[in-house]
Structure formats: structure tokens, C-alpha cells
Amino acid sequence: MVGEAESADGPDLTRRVVYVHGIGQHDGADSWKQMWDVSLFGRSMGSETIGAYWANILHEDAPAGSLSRAARRGSAGGERTEFEGRLLSQLLGEGATAGSPYGTRVFPLPEFLRTPLTKVFLKQFVKDTAAYFYDDKLRQQMRARLLDVIRRLGEEPFVLVAHSQGTMIAYDVLQELGERCTVSRFVTLGSPLGIQEVQDGLKHLLGVKSKGGLPIPKAIHRWDNFAARFDPVAADPVLADDFDRGKEILRDHSIDNPYTWRIKGFNPHDSRGYLANPDVRGVVYRAVGHDLTSRFVVARDVMEQCARFPEADGQAAERLPVLIEVLEPAYSAAGETKDAMIRREKKAGSRTETLAGRIADLEEQLKTLVRGDLRGKAAADAVEAAAIQPLRKYVAAHLTPGEVETVASNPGEYHVYAVWRSSTKRKLLNRSHGPLAVDAARASYGAEGQGITWAVLDTGCRSDHPHFADHGTVVKVLDCTKPNPEPLELSGPAADPDGHGTHVCGIIAGSGKTNEAKSRDVLGIAAKTRLIVYKVLDDQGRGEDASIIKAIDHIFRTNQAYPGLQIHGVNLSLGGPFDPTVYGCGHSPLCKELRDLWRQGVVVCVAAGNEGVVTVTSGGEKRDLYTPLSIGDPANLDDCIAVGSVNADKPHLFGISHFSSRGPTADGRMKPDVVAPGERILSCNSDFAVGKRRPNGKERLYREDSGTSMACPHVSGLIAAFLSVRREYIGRPDEVKRILLANCNDLGRERYHQGAGIPNLMKMLMNT
């Protein structure tokens, strides 16, 4: 950030926010304001925000129910905006930088030559701006829209948020009003006010004779200017040097617009991308006293994705995976009064009296929304592409940005509590029995997991592998990656082409012998444990939260259907990053579902993650940095056992694996909970070929792999073995976790690296 730091005098008490948009065709005043509300606040803000809409002075509104060219492209607007952006970018590349002798100019010429060239250029390529500078009647009409809003507010202070040409209109109007209004915060996004030609035009319109900087309107108390990297319209990202008193009240911020990183349709000027940026949101929220964690309908990372993947002319809209959390009956939607909620529910009737009924309704509403005006095969294809599937508390779907905005605009009608991103999770990559004292417990107590069933959520499993098939270890393999109402059963090679899940399952249970020249016995930690495997990751080891939640729902319902638990624990050797600005640490939709499972009595074991080391380039050399605060999601859940990795042979000597994620969690809790062997672990090879010789050793029944993915099933197997002997602890995961942590071997390492240490099954059995 360039400029002074935020002052410490606390947030303003302003409540109203006024919007001014940039050039181009839009969808109409209401639709445009709704889109800005959702992008900035995550929900409709009603009368708390007011839009100064001027697009229909120069353009017809887009047809009702459709997205304008500007919205589809995510551009500043207008048919030629993308071409304008490319042309401006080329022109600005001619030495026109803030440090050049000419300043930031499109035409690096003296003013008497620059002015006529600017006029020709604008009239040819940027007609909205040309109208503002060279047609006084149209300029007055544009200004009147904002003046009318400000006059209606009277003496009430307000926050003014303007984008692109809207920043010029806002500056012009505020300069005229002087101290007759109070702008507690002026927020400019992708502003061209730093470009010399724009300053020339404004000086001419305002009658400013000075050769120095432009004056800052007296109405503005604070000014925050946001310029996205590579935004050609904000060619000069630093405005503080261009305005009198700029360094006193104007703060320049350099940010990333998510649309910058899109390969197709590159446009770092996109208004939604600016509005969804956490820095922009932070400034506006503080200015209006709006809590950063306050109620929203659409999560910020979903809006960022919408900005990355806007709908485009002549292209199929890209669909974004989302989880729509359904509003519980008797709760009001965001921004809805209790009376309005009661009226809505009375009108809807008995269909919405239960959560299941609301989920069924939402499923049908989404299908109707996705079909739109389509008919026949096109409508069926659209519904199939949307992958709509009802879950226990959510409806998962792949929606276009326009469909997301429609749902967000009508949370009461759709019974939506929140729209979350269905984020991507990925896999986290007999000498290991010794450190856990499993061999001794097996010999002394017969602790082999008998009578215990464990669920494994992973890439699937080759249940026909001799390690499992000879003992009937794997009860079934269920596919949750397809949008079917219920998981589908899999078998054979198709059950796990990736192999990660098969390797994980072999660590927990089953037994066999290697088919090498010198055969070795390979035992699961709890060899007699039965496994139910859910394929929640695809054949490349990646999967959505929706697939994982679908499996969790199935486990929850299976247990609910019987008096006692049918599935006693789950293993998740998977994970991914999380955004603490969207939800609290350990409170993502996936974490909330796992918490329900834990409270049902199911032990939840999760890999801590393999983000303990990152490689950076410094001084031309690559260096490894070991990172704290690297615990991922869902390992940051409190109601789970998060497992880090140690060396399998000499854990006390070599300590924590270099790749193992380290705590604390982002909110300061100790994680991982424990560590277990995770380096070069021998387990089942899914690409086996019994009785056949194949190149590269693929005929082998077993292979080695490393990662917290391998450490986690060691603890799952250990707890299954414990429960098979101490059955009174079945259904009491809190006590199981307490016993586990109290009976660990301390490695003498930092607690945020090792947790309580390595679990010791013999100690657990002896001390209970």
C-alpha cells in the first residue's frame, strides 16, 4: 500500500453507501445495484445502499432476465471494451509510466498537441467518456443522477464507491458541491483519474487554471484508491501525488483483481473483481461499521470465482461448484425481517415446514433456473451440467455466475442461508507398527479391530486386492463423485485407478504377503477391522467438498437407522487450504458436517497436511522454508484427531517429517493432535497383477509411499484396535481422544509440531 496507514480513530458511523458505475451497457438500475451489493456485501442491502445509475442515458438497458455484455464479460462495459483495454495497454506501453518525463499519458506530447488527439481517440474508441467531456448536455444528465441521490440524503454522511468513469463523475460532482455534503469515505476502483488526459479534461470542465495537481473536494474526509495490477484504466495507480492534500487524506492501494489471472478474456478492470477483494471490503465495512464476519448470502471466495469466470458471448458459461446451505425453518434469510419471513412461510405452505422439504424444493427451483428458456435436449444437458444433488443440509450444484447472483438476490424465495464454495480437497501423500506398540497390544490383548467398522473417504479401493479379498476386509466401495441421489457401488480396477485409497486402506486393515523373491508379511494396524470405502476424490486424487459431504451424510444416515453405531470411525487422508476471511477456522461446511458425525459418536481422524515446507527462490537459489500455521482444512476442526507425520524407523532421533504441517491453527489451538509414522510406508499397490510380469515392477502387490496420508490411517487403525478390546468406549469420541492424548510417547519436540506425541496402544489398554 502506498500512502499513510489507516488512522486509529475507529470506524465511522456512516450507514449509507452510494454506488456509481463505469462505462457501457448494464442490466438496469435494480439488477446492477443488486450485483454490486452481492459482490461487495455478499447479499442484498436494500435501502442501505443507493445506486446512481446513468448507463441508460447512453445505452438501452439489456433485456430483462439476461446479463448485459458488460456483466457477461465482466468488463467495464460496452461492445468494444476489450478492444479498448488492449489498445490502451499498447499505448501506455510507449514509455508512459509514472516515472517517465511525461508522467502517465496516453499521448506523450505537449498539451496543445495532446488535447486534440485525445478528443479524436475518445470519440472513436471510448464513446461514454467522449460524451462526458465533449457533450455538455449528456454530462449534465450523468451528473444529475448522482446529484439527485446526494440531495435525497440531505446532511447524512455517506460512503461513495465509484468504478472507472464513475470516479470521474463522482469527483466532478463533489467538487461542485463543496461542503454541502459529507463523504466520510470516497472509494475509487480502477480509476483513470491519474491519467494526464483525464486530468486535462477535468481541469477544463472545472475551470482549474493551476499547472499543479487537482484539488480534492472539501466534502471528502478520507479517500481510498484501489488499482489492480495490470489494469490499463488505472494506468497511474498512485493518485496521492496528483492531488493537492493528497498525501494527507488519500491512500493508494495496489491489489489483485481475480479476473487478472483468467487466460481467456483477461480483464483486471472488472468491477465485481474489485468489489469482492478483501481489502476493498475491509475499507468499506469499517467505514459503515459493518462487521467483517457479519451475515452474508454469498461467501467472498464464491464472488471472486464469479469474477474469474464471467459469462461470455458465444461461449458456454463456466460453472462453479457451490454448496448451498439451506435455511432452517423458522429462521429469516439475510436482510429479511421476522414479519416478512412469517408472511413468506405462510404463503409457501406446508412444503417448507421441514428442512428435507426445503431441500427438495430448492433442488427443483435450481433445475428450473438452470433450464431457463431452454427446451428439450438443451434443457436436459444444462441440468446435467449443473450436477444438482441434494444433501442432508445442503444442495450441491455447479452454477454460472449469473445463476449464483439470482439465488443470492432471492435468499428468502430459495430458502438459502449461505452459498459456499465447494472447495477442492486432494489426497495427502510393517516397520511402522513398532513405534505405536501395536505388535505388543496384538499379542497381549488380541487387539486386531474385530467387530469394528471404519469408513475411509478417499480415491476408492481395490477390494479385489489379495490383502483384502482373502479376508473380506472391504465390505463395499461406494462412489460419491457422481451427482446421483445415492452413492454407487464400485468394484475391480475402476474402484481406484489412482491407488491412494487402496494404500490407505491397507495400512488400517487386512493382511498379506509381498510377492517378491523374499516374501514379507504385511499387516494392517487393525487387521480384522471391516472397511466401508467412499470414493470422494477423482482418479487424479482431487474432489469437491460436495462429494465428501455426500459420504458423511450417508454415514450419518446409516448410523441413524440402527440403535447402535454401524460405522465407528472415519479416516480422511485428504485436505486443502481454507480462507479465514470467509469462515472461522474449523467452521467450514465440511467441518460442520464432520462435527455432526463426531457428536453422533463417530471418531474422526484427519491428515494434518503436507504443507510443512514450501520452496521459495531467493538470490537465484531455491530454498526450503519450514512453515508454522500450515494446518489445512478439515484438520483444523477441534472435534477430530489431526495426525502429523514422523519417521517410521527412528522417530525419537529424526523427529517430525519435514513435509508434515505444523500448528498452531489460525485461531491459536494446538494441532496436530498426535503424530504417527508417515515416511516410506509399505502398503497395497492398486496397480497389481497377480501371476503376470509387467515392466517397472507394476506386478508388485505392495509399494511404499509417504505423507500425512499414510500417518493418519495408522491412528485410525490404532483406535479401531483399541475399541475392539475396550468396547465400552464405542460412541464416546471425546473420551477416546482424551485417552489417546494422555497415552502418547513424547518426542521432545515443539508441541505445535508433534502434538501430544506418538500414540501408544499398549499404554491406552493398560490405563483403561
Image (tube, rainbow, N blue to C red):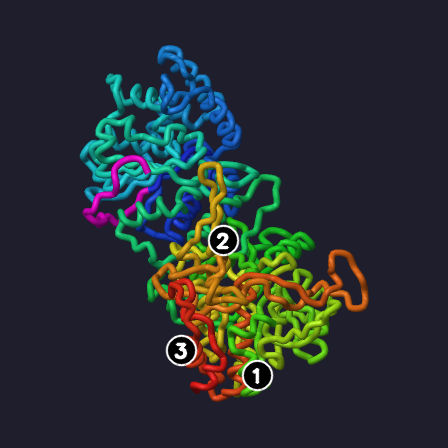
Helix, strand, or loop for circle 2?
helix
Q: Is residue 449 visible?
A: yes
Which residue is disc 1 drawn over?
Answer: 442
State which region is magenta: 1-18
Q: Nearer the viewer, residue 433 or 496?
A: 433
**Position of 467 compared to 237: left or right?**
right
Q: CA distance from mark 2 to mark 1?
A: 54 Å
Helix, strand, or loop for circle 1?
helix
In this rendering, the answer to whether 262 lies above or below 466 is: above
In this rendering, the answer to whether 333 lies above or below 180 is: below
Q: Position of residue 324 (x, y in %)?
A: 49, 61
- Give the mark nearest the N terminus, 3 or 2: 2
Magenta-span inclusion, residue 220: no
The type of residue carrying mark 1 is Arg
In this rendering, the answer to whether 526 lies above or below 195 is: below
Residue plotted at (47% across, 35% down): 77
The type of residue carrying mark 2 is Val
Answer yes or no: do the residues labelled 2 and 1 have beta carbons within 8 Å? no
Q: Nearer the viewer, residue 76 or 152?
A: 76
Residue plotted at (33% across, 31% down): 238
Between disc 3 and disc 2, the foreground one is 3
- Give the mark nearest the N terminus, 3 or 1: 1
Which residue is disc 2 drawn over?
Answer: 404
Q: CA distance from mark 3 to mark 2?
A: 47 Å
Which residue is disc 3 drawn over?
Answer: 742
The type of residue carrying mark 3 is Ala
Q: Position of residue 43 (x, y in %)?
A: 39, 54
**Position of 133 compared to 650: left or right?**
left
